[in-house]
Image (cartoon, rainbow, N blue to C red):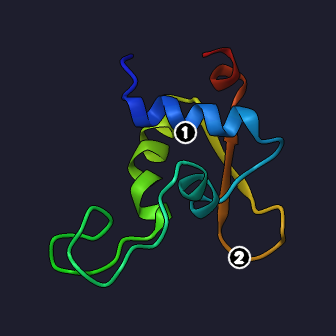
Amino acid sequence: MKLTQRMRDVIKVLREHDGPMTPNNIGRSLGFNTGHREKGPQSNHCGRVMGPAQRVIFSLTALRRHGLVIMTRRPDGLSGTAYELSFKGRQV
């Protein structure tokens, strides 16, 4: 299984953080912040701003398919999901 650089970065962030993280928190930890309302590196090409979660969700989905991360409840009790490393993911 070949991991992309972003997948490795997501694993690193999850390893450094103790407990589950939401996709927005993971994206912010990787430096993806909400951009400006103009076309740029953090917008889709229609001028819509992409949030931090949208930048990491594909990597999280792939890592989940490989069994490296698991979905869990959010630590703050709000609706939605959070992610944390599985046993297999901690070994990578």
From what the image shows, is residue 10 above or below residue 51? above
Q: Position of residue 41 (x, y in %)?
A: 27, 61
> At x 15% / y 71%, what residue is drawn?
45
The quarter of the rendered structure image containing the C terminus is top right
Where disc 1 sits, the SS reads helix
Q: Position of residue 69 (x, y in %)?
A: 61, 37
Give how far apart the Cα atoms at labels 2 and 1 are.
Answer: 22 Å
The quarter of the rendered structure image containing the N terminus is top left
Amino acid type shown at disc 2: Ser
Q: How many dots with numbers?
A: 2
Locate residue 49: give its quadrant: bottom left
Note whether residue 85 is visible: no
> At x 36% / y 71%, what residue is drawn?
50
- Left or right: 20 in relation to 26: right
Where disc 2 sits, the SS reads loop
Task: Return the residue at label 1.
Answer: 10
Task: Return the residue at label 2.
Answer: 79
